[in-house]
């Protein structure tokens, strides 16, 4: 197989990789905020639930979570496609780490900002949405940038539950052509070429949002 | 002086754990009256102001603002801790300028001043803008409207903070050591702005400061605080020239020596 | 659905595979500690080419999946005459991947020592080595020890990936049990619980260590 042919064969898996990454990142993003706020809730029960979720996910391993969702859940009647399992496992995992980013950013907005907004008689909701969150969000960006990359890299794991992503394709082609060096070198390069612009993109946004303000 | 009492502290206590920083304060402030709180650091002045701004809750006692209880409200004839709604309503009478400015770093100077009138008072954007511009003109910063706070000097930041508090038209404004965080050469510009506002007369002031000359100049009444109680109060000249307690004499002499 | 007697029956088999998981973790961590230090020093090199190359290497490793890196080490290295056992390949892969993160940790530790400390060292006429060993390292290390601890835990939780290159650690053991008995629920749940049981208390310990070391 020529290098070009190899490349095209591999790229068939790109769509799967990007789909899983996109939906997992979206799910993780939403969960990060829901759980991040949950951990700061005034209601003890919500705090407890959020904390348990975060600690259980962070205390176990992504691949174990993926296998558990894909292989073990069907036994108690919850069945889903490999794609769904991949998205949910990566999203749940990312959400746990992301919620820490949200929580720590919110609590690191200086207390004076809250005091000033009380003095100006903003309602609690306005304080959060107009004053605290815009500042916290800028602090979250580097963390979310890293999280995106971690999730993208994590999508390679779905190849282990037989989903045809880039890594899965590489293994299949490797088994039939034995052009091992070429295949895995190209595979690494493809991942790098997806991740690199994502990293740079987040840095660019961060710069745009902070220039002259902090 | 008008006889309407705007703010009334009734037997206010405040403790942090075992440490009691306010030990039963009774103090009334008339509408439009300028009261300066002086005293050593840690004497409880700032806490007294923060209680009025609802940044901290009294351990015991009540505060009345414009005839309404601030931290409490009556529900079915029983006194309860005030709801957020009640606090919101009463708090509208009060404004505050902080030692460390606390400008919103993600907003321009103009946005800093416009935000609260729009979202709290429900003003139209154009009206809020006009009002904010007038106020910024008054504090001498009309050329900085589109700047972000990070690019301002300390003195400029504090003047923006004053404008931001003023546009809310509070009946009484708290100044919590407004010049303590400033480089010495920037103190004057902020004091001048506060003096100008004081001369206009309508708005009451609760002024915490270590700038003694300034306090004596603008205050109708000076209140001397020490270890959580009011030790002496009266018109500035009387207090300055004729301190009755030894504590005040020591306190004043330290300032006279320093200058 | 959940079969307690089956769970108890397979528990010893899974627990015994923990030996592999834990030794891979520590061996990988040791590799990462050393490689990370080398990368840090290369990055501080005065020669721009060397520091740029180190930087590029770090970026590349951090922006590609560790699973693919493991495949690369396990399947591609033999093409160049370097055949590694699954365990050795796993340790090298884990160590290599996390060395790039640890080099960042070292760097932040060193950067956090105020510039004045270097100047004081020079003013007191310390040699370059003395400045490093007597002034910089004693200040740079304690703040980052808990961070290193957290990376040790992260690596521990990454070891199940080594099952992909046929290492029979705890996840692979559970998978074998699952495919043998068609009962995945107990096997995978036990693996998850074991990870939680080991890593959660450790993370609490690290938090305490952090408070103790960094209360200055």
Image (spheres, coloured by chain):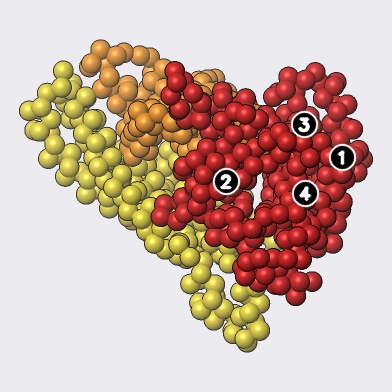
Q: Which residue is mark 3?
A: B169
Left or right of B109 in this view: A64: left
Percent from the top left, x then y, of residue A125?
Answer: 58, 25
Same chain assignment for discs 3 and 1: yes
Q: Colour of chain A?
A: orange
Precedes in sequence: disc 3 or disc 1: 3
Q: Colour of chain C?
A: yellow
Precedes in sequence: disc 1 or disc 2: 2
Left or right of C62 in this view: C48: right
Precedes in sequence: disc 4 or disc 2: 2
Percent from the top left, x then y, of residue C118?
Answer: 63, 75
Q: Which residue is mark 2?
A: B26
Q: Colour of chain B?
A: red
Mark 3, secondary structure of its residue: loop
Marks 1 and 2, how far apart in space?
28 Å
Q: Which residue is mark 4?
A: B220
């Amino acid at each position: 197989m020529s290098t070009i042919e190899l490349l095209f064969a591999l790229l068939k898996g790109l769509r799967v990789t990007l789909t899983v990454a996109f939906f997992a990142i979206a799910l993780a993003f939403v969960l990060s905020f829901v759980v991040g706020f949950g951990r700061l809730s005034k209601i003890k029960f919500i705090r407890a639930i959020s904390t348990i979720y975060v600690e259980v996910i962070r205390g176990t391993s992504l691949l174990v979570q993926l296998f558990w969702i894909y292989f073990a859940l069907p036994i108690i009647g919850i069945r889903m496609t490999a794609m769904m399992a991949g998205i949910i496992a990566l999203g749940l995992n990312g959400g746990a780490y992301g919620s820490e980013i949200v929580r720590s950013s919110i609590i690191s907005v200086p207390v004076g900002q809250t005091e000033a907004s009380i003095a100006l008689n903003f309602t609690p909701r306005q304080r959060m949405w107009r004053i605290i969150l815009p500042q916290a969000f800028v602090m979250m960006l580097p963390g979310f940038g890293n999280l995106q990359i971690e999730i993208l890299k994590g999508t390679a794991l779905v190849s282990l539950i037989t989903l045809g992503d880039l890594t899965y394709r590489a293994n299949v082609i490797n088994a039939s052509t034995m052009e091992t060096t070429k295949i895995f070198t190209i595979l690494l390069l493809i991942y790098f070429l997806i991740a690199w612009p994502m990293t740079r993109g987040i840095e660019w946004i961060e710069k745009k949002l902070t220039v002259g303000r902090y | 002086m008008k006889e309407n009492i705007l703010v009334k502290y009734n037997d206010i206590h405040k403790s942090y754990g075992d440490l009691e920083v306010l030990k039963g304060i009774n103090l009334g402030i008339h509408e439009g009256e300028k009261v300066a709180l002086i005293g050593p650091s840690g004497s409880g002045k700032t806490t007294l102001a923060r209680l009025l701004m609802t940044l901290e809750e009294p351990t015991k006692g009540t505060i009345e603002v414009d005839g309404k209880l601030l931290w409490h409200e009556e529900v079915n004839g029983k006194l309860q801790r005030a709801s957020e709604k009640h606090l919101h309503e009463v708090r509208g009478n009060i404004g505050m300028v902080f030692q460390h400015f606390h400008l919103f770093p993600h907003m321009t100077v103009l946005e800093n001043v416009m935000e609260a009138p729009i979202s709290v008072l429900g003003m139209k954007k154009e009206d809020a803008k006009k009002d904010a511009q007038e106020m910024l003109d008054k504090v001498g910063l009309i050329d900085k409207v589109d700047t972000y706070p990070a690019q301002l000097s300390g003195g400029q930041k504090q003047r923006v903070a004053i404008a931001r508090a003023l546009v809310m038209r509070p009946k009484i404004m708290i100044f919590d050591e407004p010049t303590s965080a400033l480089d010495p050469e920037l103190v004057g510009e902020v004091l001048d702005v506060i003096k100008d506002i004081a001369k206009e007369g309508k708005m009451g002031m609760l002024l915490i400061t270590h700038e003694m000359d300034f306090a004596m100049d603008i205050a109708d009444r000076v209140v001397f605080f020490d270890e959580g109680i009011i030790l002496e109060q009266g018109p500035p000249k009387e207090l300055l020239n004729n301190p009755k307690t030894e504590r005040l004499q020591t306190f004043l002499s330290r300032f006279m020596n320093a200058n | 659905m959940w079969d307690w007697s089956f769970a108890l029956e397979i528990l010893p088999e899974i627990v015994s595979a923990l030996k592999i998981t834990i030794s891979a973790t520590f061996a990988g961590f040791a590799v990462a500690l050393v490689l990370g230090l080398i990368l840090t020093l290369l990055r501080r090199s005065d020669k721009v080419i060397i520091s740029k190359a180190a930087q590029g290497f770090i970026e590349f490793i951090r922006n590609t999946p560790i699973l693919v890196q493991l495949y690369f080490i396990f399947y591609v290295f033999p093409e160049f005459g370097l055949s590694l056992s699954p365990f050795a390949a796993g340790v090298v892969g884990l160590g290599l991947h996390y060395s790039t993160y640890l080099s960042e940790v070292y760097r932040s530790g060193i950067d956090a020592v105020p510039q004045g400390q270097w100047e004081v060292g020079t003013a007191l006429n310390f040699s370059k080595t003395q400045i490093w060993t007597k002034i910089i390292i004693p200040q740079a290390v304690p703040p980052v020890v808990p961070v290193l601890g957290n990376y040790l835990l992260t690596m521990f939780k990454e070891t199940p990936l080594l099952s992909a290159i046929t290492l029979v650690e705890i996840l692979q053991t559970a998978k074998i049990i699952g495919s043998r008995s068609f009962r995945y629920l107990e096997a995978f749940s036990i693996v998850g619980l074991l990870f939680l049981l080991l890593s959660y208390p450790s993370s609490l310990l690290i938090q305490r260590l952090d408070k103790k070391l960094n209360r200055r």
